[in-house]
Image (tube, helix red, strand yellow):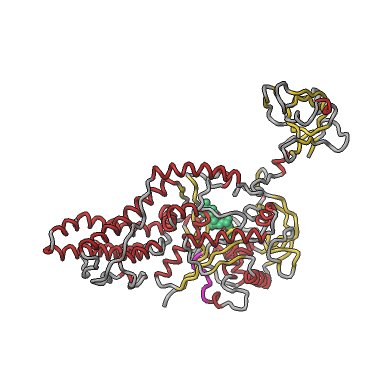
Amino acid sequence: MSDTYYITTPIYYVNDMPHIGHIYTTVMADIFARYHRLCGDRVRFLTGTDEHGQKIQKAAQAQGIEPLALADKVVARYHHLWEILNISHDDFIRTTDARHQQGVSEIIRRITAAGDIYKGEYEGWYCAGAEAFVPDSQVRDGKDLETGYPVERLSEPSYFFKLSTFQDRLLAWYRANPDCIQPKTRYNEVLRFVEGGLKDLSISRASLSWGVPFPDDPEHVVYVWLDALTNYISALGFGSDDDTLYGEHWPASMHLVGKDILRFHCVYWPAFLMSAGLPLPRQIFGHGWWLRDEAKMSKSLGNVVRPDYLVDRFGTDAVRYFLARDMTFGQDASFSDEAFLERFNADLANSLGNVSSRTLAMVRRNLDGKVPASTSDGPVPEAAQTAVTAFREAMDRNAPHRALEATWRLLATIDGFIQERQPWAVARKGDEARKELESILYSCLEGLRIASLLIEPIIPSTAAKLRAQLGATDLPVNLADGVTWGLMGEGHKVGESEPLFPRIDIKAYLKELQSGQETEKAKAKKERTPEDEMITIDDFSKVQLKVGIVREAERVPKSKKLMKIMVDVGEGEPRQLVAGIAAQYEAESLIGRRIVVIANLQPAKLMGVESRGMLLAATGEDGAPFLLSPDGEVDPGAQVR
Ligand code: MSP
């Protein structure tokens, strides 16, 4: 009997284009899904997009398009990325799908029937960046201390979920299932958080329209996290006419998420499910964050690693391998180009690439390209079995980086065996040593075939390519009978071979990258979306705008554009300003005119003349300035807002 294995990724917000941090969760989920398929389990793998809420509504507004149009654009990008990254998901859910909205309505109906929802008034902070209600104690200077995003004050009618009554039930669940949250440090964090007490949770928004309508009260939309979390069951048909998949696959074996969204998955989600009388997920794993050269990745810093560039340049499997190998699963890691390149050369080009190409070249040259009779020479057969056991054990305890180490130990054993037995020297001895040569090369071939099964979940295309080169395409690809020693049949022809991973000239590449990065940074500057450009009211209030009356004006000598003016901004003494308006305005026409001035701009010198502020002007098509004036006789110094 095979087990079922249902694994999910978070569903991604569609306000922005994905970077390497976003693809990480999905690549790792894909590795687990493929591993379980290889073990013979009945796997279901779900990913998708989180399309409702204030954050998406705002981003769409800023671009002047409908939220769904923005979502469609970003969804297309995700489909493209999942394709180039060889992601083997069985389903892609969008929270704007009708099937999803049915699931959300159904879970709310059940929670209501359980008596866990009441209507009240939400008065407090909201952080649109994290789509989270934020307690007063976590707000400083208009920002959410946990995420750094700005918060806003809400005061609106709301439906509440009686989360506070779930504390004991949640604690009992954690304690009875010590593996339900991983790694252990995260388990402890969640436990401590819940032990501290829980407040009821607002689960609807009255001041927002972009969401699933709240059942029986269309004045409200469902709070986006209740909406989003339900994707894990709505995608299986929960709440729709056909819930066969739900019956087969729920509860989930693994919700894979980033550490930043652990609380939603480990506290809110199980409480919603408990209330609705539904089974709880078996495990939630909170992985760490990818940093860029030790710093947080951010679009405005221009240091975001874009996955398609790496895939284009080095191939899908190099990216998948690096992500799985270089991060201790569960901890943070730093992405650096150097580390990527070094891993590529050492592990892929050298270890895997060299061992296989040397073995195959010798088989072709000395054995007519044919697989010799089965033997179990040297340490390789045992090393292969040890690697299979260690690999499975590491994958089963969510340590894919260790599983890869075990595989590379097998490759190192094959390499060491070749060094020690020197098959090229044996070949030179001619016919009398033919048996010995065959025996050595068989061990290498078979060791490589078993390694190809271990790398299958991580770098599936390379694994298939390697098996084709070994001539082993007709043998079982699984981690049961497939890993038995001695399956490669005598006389079988090995396939064509080309280098699996050609070595990279690191120095040359870094140079190439340097110039690329300069343009990337420039692009990042240019490509700032309207949403990036948004400022808060606090930012705006830093600029002191005042009405001024021009008292004197004269051209700056030797300048076509600059005019020196003395402006009364209500400070007693007039201020001296230099403005680029001399080509369009005569000095005399300015005297007595009311203008708008930025009064707290740092002083600057223009053609040696000091300017203590700046006047406001609209820019015409050809760049010509048009002065702004108040619509009436306001006193100098009056504030402009
Ligand atoms: N929409 C919510 C999830 C709802 S699930 C019911 C969300 N979306 S997200 O697009 O902001 O993030 C999706 C995933 O990407 C999260 O698991 C997050 O941790 C992960 N990452 C985003 N940046 C990351 C890194 N720099 N490094 C690793 N993963 C990070 O949250």
- Horizontal and vertical percent position of residue 187: 50, 58
Residue bounds of the magenta highlight = 248-254
In percent of width and height, residue 287 lies at 49, 56
Of 170 and 124, nearer the camera is: 124
Whether 537 is drawn above or below 417: the answer is above
Direction from residue 160 to residue 292 in the image, left or right? left
Q: Is residue 510 visible?
A: yes
- Residue 253 colored in magenta in the image: yes
Residue 601: give x, y in percent of width and height.
70, 31
Locate residue 492 relative to residue 82 in the image: left or right.
left
Which quadrant holds the N terminus?
A: bottom left
Q: Nearer the viewer, residue 150 or 70?
A: 70
**Image coords of residue 579 (percent x, y):** 73, 29
Q: Is residue 220 above or below residue 148?
A: below
Which picture quadrant has residue 375? bottom left
Q: Quadrant of residue 443?
A: bottom left
Residue 40 magenta-highlighted = no
Which quadrant would residue 506 be assigned to in this image?
top left
Q: Nearer the viewer, residue 374 or 209?
A: 374
Q: Is residue 195 visible?
A: no
Which is more toward the observer, 267 or 497?
Answer: 497
Q: Residue furthest left?
A: 432
**Does residue 240 appear to the left or right of 124 in the view shown?**
left
Question: Which residue appears at 58% of the width and 72% of the height?
Answer: 278
Residue at point 20% right, 55% down?
A: 420
